[in-house]
Structure formats: structure tokens, C-alpha cells
Amino acid sequence: MSQIIMAIDQGTTGSTVLLVKESGDILARGYQEFPQIYPKSGWVEHDPEAIWDSVVGAMYRAFKRSGANPEEVAAIGITNQRETTIVWERKSGRPIHNAIVWQCRRTSQMCQDLKQQGLEPTFKARTGLVLDPYFSGTKVAWILNQVPGAREQAEAGELAFGTVDSFLIHRLTGGQKHVTDASNASRTLLFNIRDMEWDSELCAHLDVPMSVLPEVVENAGRIGVTKGVPGLPDGIPIAGVAGDQQAALFGQTCFAVGEGKITYGTGAFLLVNTGQTCAVSEHGLLTTVAWKLDGKVTYAFEGSAFIAGAAVQWLRDGLNLIETAPDVEDLARSVEDTDGVYFVPALTGLGAPHWRADARGAITGITRGTTRAHLARATLEGIAFQNYDIMKAMEDDLGKPLKSVRVDGGACANDLLMQMQADLLGVEILRPQQVETTAIGAAFLAGLGAGVWDDLSEVRQAWKLDRSFKRAADEHSIREKLNGWKQAVERV
């Protein structure tokens, strides 16, 4: 009898559950949204109970649509919004505060204070990260400092901290497990990615007691088993876990050094496998743990553009230039080029490799002849240009060009954008048949951990190509475009 793997993809606005066959094909999909909470400007929270309810609801929908029996599930894989922070009581499992979401900026001053103490080089050397409220460490400290009695409870060993993967595993196992995986641990500012251990000195700098930290496990293996989960039998192994971007890298089967992927979502996330060397970027990229399997750690360079799909949403909702996001492709195709218009989508600053939080979006080159079609095409080009900047930084750090890049996420369905990306990068763009590679990556890890697949070569066979895109534009026109982009970025 064929085996089913259940992949939980817990995202920022909702939870997706995929039922995946041994072939790598998706049997069924369930999805459930949950509310966003904005207590103050720049603050973002989630109700952890709403997160859990959305996972249970998505599971119910997936099984209902598939007609499959939960007894057929061989293993569960989990991937999650990274950095989002939850603290709960060990005995009751009750969260003591809403989850503080990765987008939340409430600990900006704390990060600034640490920088002024000259601590950023220490944190970057040990964690691969910069001091930014994006990451979990300062969020934990905030909860312990602001919730009455929390710090005393923590010191007494009564509280547990975790990113969303940790919280879900705790719930799925009936409170038996308090663990996280190596990829999520590497996003906390508390984990030494060279020693692969929690760092007592960094914890002290952030005033986070080590008693609240979870055990760090490998990304595939028998992590725990289900107990008391609505709709699931007890005893199903949880066999794979990874943060969302690392799961997407795994789902794209980027197992060799120099293999990379771009995920097109609200923003764009680029990761390139750097192998077992914990390399430090000289060009503004983050170093992160990709995964740990069979005792071996694989690292990656990561760069993110804060705005990608959100730029198209702005055309739709802010300017009313299009009715639906997919309409942007036909509108952009209605003109041959942008007629000299450039759009720098720095609507929330510029990320890697520029790291300019003060930058704001700009549209340059507008004339009386500029139409909404030119703006639509410039928007797609702007997304592709940002990814060019990040990818070139990665190639400079690696010391060699990439041969190909795999793509996923909603916007990768836009053929015009993919062709633009291939033209700019000068490498082959590979789009898989299954573009939900974040959840697929969790399924691959779980299948590997449960023995559904024996090794990475078998996992590779489950990846299937939909279409490839190669450079079609001449190099002279590309150089001119890149010069224009560079000038536009310098103006923001």
C-alpha cells in the first residue's frame, strides 16, 4: 500500500496542509486563515491558539478533499514562519502572551542598544545574523520582561520558548516534546551556528535564561509521535522539520554546493547551498543553517528583497491599475519595454545587499508617453532587478557563477517575470511542477526521516520540471538596463 506524508506549512496569514504521495505528487490540499493582530504601529502578533486551530482546520479540509484515511499517514513534516516567537507554560501548554511575529519591530530600540554596546560583530560571527528585531532573541526577552511574573517563572524552569515549529510539535505530541530543529534555531540570535549549540554568552547579552530553550534536533528523523490530536491517530511519527525558506531549498532539491532557489512571495527570498563550510558573506548576505542530516550540517547564504509580490498588490490595491494580480502579466506584455521607466520597489526599505532601511520606493524616467502598461512592466522588472543584485552578491561570495536557479512561490507562475529573471541573471531558471515547495520540502524531510525515501538521490527523483527559461535578450541591452537600474537605486 502506498504511503502518505502529511506536510504542515504554518505561514504568516494561514496554515496549509498537503497530503503528499511517495511520487512527490500532491493528493490533496487544505488551507485555513487566521487573524492578524496589530496592537500598535509596527507591532504584529498572532494568537497561538488561532495558529493551532488553523492547523487542525487545514488538516480536516485536506483529508475531507482526499478521501484518504488518517491511518494511512506514514509521517508528518512541519515547516513554519521563522522567527515568530511563542512562550508557554510547560505544564499546561498555555501561551503566556500572543506570539510576536517576525514582522514586528517592537524591539528595535533593544537592538540599537546592543549595537551601541559594540556587540553586533560578536552576534554576526556566532549566529550569521545581524542585530535586528526580525529575529527571535529580543522578542523572547520582551515577553519575559513585560508579562508580570514571567521572568520568575522562566528562572524556575516553568516556561518554554519556541518558534512556531516548536509550539506545533508540543501540541502534536500532547506536550511530550519541547524541541526545535537546527534551521529554526539558527534564526534566533541565540544559537552558535559553528558549534551548533545554544550560546550561553549570547543568551546572557539578551537576558534570556537557557532554561526556556528547546532541545535542538536534526531536520529528519523520529522527532516525536502524535498524541491526542483531533482527527489523527496516536503514534504517527513527526519525522521532518525546517524553517520555511530552508524547507523550500530542500523542496527544490538544492543538495549540492552552488545550487540555489528564489521564492517569490510577498518578498523574494534567495538561498544558495554553501555546503559544510560556514562561510561569512562579504557582500551583505546572511549565513544560516540550511539543514542537519546524519550528523552533517549544510549551510546557506540568504538574501531577501522585502517587496516582490507586494509590489504587484500595490498596483492592484493602491493604484487600481489592475483588477487581479495575474492581470499584471498581460498588461506588461502589451508594451515591448518600459520606455525608460524604472521602479525601485523599496516600499519598506532595501534589503540585501544594500541594507538601507531608510530607502523608499521610487519611479524614474516618467514622460508624457508613460502608460499604466509601462508601470506594470517596470514593476516586474524591479522585482527581477532586486534579485539580480542579491544573486550577484552570492556569486561574488561563492567565487563562481551559478549555472541555474530554481524558482517557486505564487509569482513564479508569471512567465514574463521568469523570462525577465533569466535575461538578467544569464542563468537557466527552472520552475517545478509543484510550486508549493516549502510544504513539499517538509514532506521530503519527513519521508526521508521515516524511510519512505532511502537517500537524497531518491528525493531528487520526486522533483519534476514544469518549464525552464533561458536568456533571450542580447547582452548589450541587458547592460544598459542594469546601468539604468543602478542609477535609479542611487536616487532612493
Image: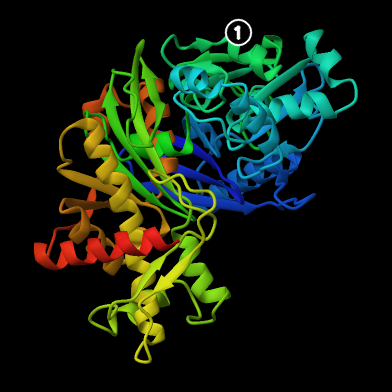
SS for dot 1 = helix
* Residue drawn where x is 74% and y is 53% of the image: 41
Colour scheme: rainbow
Nearer-the-camera pick, 466 or 263: 263
Judge from the rendering whether residue 68 lies leftward or rightward of residue 300; answer left or right: right
Residue 369, x across and y down, in percent? 34, 91
Question: The N terminus lies in which quarter of the figure?
Answer: top left
* Residue drawn where x is 56% and y is 45% of the image: 11
For disc 1, the marked residue is 200
Circle 1 packing at 10 Å, graded few (<14), some (14-19), many (20+), is some
Residue 306, x across and y down, in percent? 48, 51
Nearer-the-camera pick, 292 or 151: 151
Question: Compared to 329, does 418 lie above or below?
Answer: above
Residue 325, x across and y down, in percent? 46, 71
For this orientation, the residue located farthest to the right is: 148
Q: Is residue 462 visible?
A: no
Q: Is residue 191 visible?
A: yes
Judge from the rendering whether residue 101 lies leftward or rightward of residue 386; answer left or right: right
